[in-house]
Amino acid sequence: MANIDNDIYNRVAPTWWDEDGFMAILRTSLNPPRAAYFRNVIVQRMGLQPSGLQVLDVGCGGGLLSEEFAALGCQVTGIDPSEPTLQAAREHARKGGLNIRYLSGRGEALPFEDRSFDLVCCCDVFEHVEDLDAVLREIGRVLKPGGVLLFDTINRTRRSKLVAIKLAQDWPPTRFIPADVHVWEKFIRPQELQERMQNQGLVGCEFAGLSPRLNPFGLLLALWRTKLGRMPFAELGRRLRLRESRDLSISYMGFAVRSLA
């Protein structure tokens, strides 16, 4: 199994909010549907008022979701192992007038007291960590009883191997992210994740798929135009823009609740 290149986030840190860095695809394609789903979970499913909720964003990156929660009135703490990425997040939050606390740290050893947070968000993280069980254990520890974990990740299927590995980072005609950003063997199937979460007291799990709006031909055409320099990555993300679906075969999101015990 190839080694995953998590150092990429140090190298691309200044590009999180750019129009033509590949990280823009997360902002314009993935962030809108997952943020909408998470708002629905918080307000409609859990009956919570966002204002004042204590939220921890584990693996916060450049602050894409931290800023979404802060805009809802949550008290947000973001944590990430990449200091250059945190610098980019702090600067963007400052420009936007958002009060977000960003700290350096890892999901395997969260520097917070037990039962500190109402919500924990952990997105684009599970497929990158060395010890997933330790991350889930720490999340369960810092969540208040009845608190909610919100997450997304990538499924380990033949389809995800084709799309997320071969098309996105291996094949020269279509690749748009560097090699080894993702390693297929580290992707996790929903049933595996559910079992691991339950072992850490994270129960009542629900999943929803994330699927592209473009058909395969449209996807290939958009990728080719980006490769030729005719379309910035942010616009590629807007064309690809994912939507909530029942199809979990590539990417999926969901939530679980910290048991009251």
Image (cartoon, helix red, strand yellow):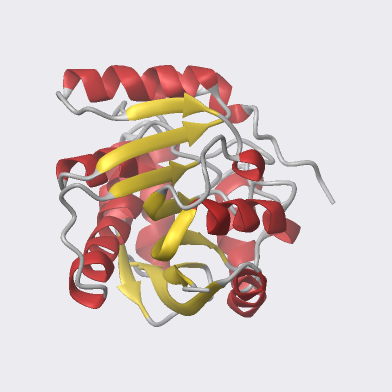
Q: Give x and y (percent) for residue 219.
A: 39, 59
**As drawn, 50 above or below 228:** below
Q: Is residue 206 visible?
A: yes
Q: Is residue 99 left or right of residue 193?
A: left
Q: Give x and y (percent) for residue 91.
A: 30, 17
Q: Is residue 26 left or right of residue 5?
A: left
> Residue at 19% across / 72% down in the picture?
47
Camera-side residue of 27 and 201: 201
**As drawn, 129 above or below 159:** above
> Residue at 67% across / 38% down in the picture?
179
Q: Is residue 23 visible?
A: no
> Residue at 75% across / 60% down in the picture?
185
Q: Quadrant of residue 160?
A: bottom right
Q: Give x and y (percent) for residue 84.
A: 50, 17
Q: Is residue 196 left or right of residue 46?
A: right
Camera-side residue of 124 and 175: 124
Q: Is residue 188 left or right of residue 57?
A: right
**As drawn, 49 above or below 190:** above
> Residue at 44% across / 71% down in the picture?
257
Q: How many marks?
A: 0
Camera-side residue of 133 and 92: 133
**As drawn, 200 above or below 168:** below
View extreme (right): residue: 1
Q: Give x and y (percent) for residue 206.
A: 43, 79
